[in-house]
Amino acid sequence: MADSNQSGCLTVGEGVVLSGSFIVPDIASISGSIEGEITARELIVASSGVIKGKVTADIIDLRGEIHDTLTAKKSLFIRSTGKALGSVQYAEIEIEKGGDLQGALQKIEGDGSPSGLPSSIA
């Protein structure tokens, strides 16, 4: 089973609850729950996944829920089952029909710096 693990990746299975601060060098795949901070190169939140806390990644693919602060340095994909609730910063964004986005939005440059004033979506 150890051979199937990818170096620098985190997988949180459905029903698993983690609390704390996580730095993931590559891909974090969340089907369970995380309370705290998570930083990754790429974050995939499955439809059963819930994150309550600060999230930072280059690419975020959201099918579940993120509550609090979300920063997508390159791309944010909110799928039809996805919910982003709170402060959202993104360089590029794509929202499928049915996707839910509530809170303050701010577009950022590719280097993570703000590109304008935040806007509110409710």
Image: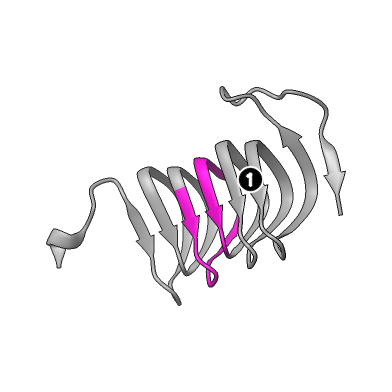
44 falls in the magenta region: yes
At mark 1, the secondary structure is strand
Residue type, numbered disc 1: Leu
User: Does 30 lie within the magenta span?
Assistant: no
Q: Is residue 1 above or below residue 27?
A: below
> Measured along the vertical axis of the image, is residue 22 above or below residue 19?
above
Asked if residue 53 is positioned above or below residue 99 in the image, the reply reads above
**Colour scheme of the picture:** one colour
Q: Nearer the viewer, residue 60 or 19?
A: 60
Q: Which residue is mark 1?
A: 70
Report which quarter residue 56 is drawn in. top right
Can the viewer see residue 104 in this picture? yes
Relative vertical location of residue 92 with respect to residue 61 in this rendering, above or below: above
Write down the region rendered in magenta.
43-63
Left or right? Give the position of 11 relative to 115.
Answer: left
At 23% across and 47% down in the image, what residue appears? 7
Residue 4 found in image quarter: bottom left
Mark 1: give few (<14), some (14-19) or many (20+) Cα within 10 Å.
many
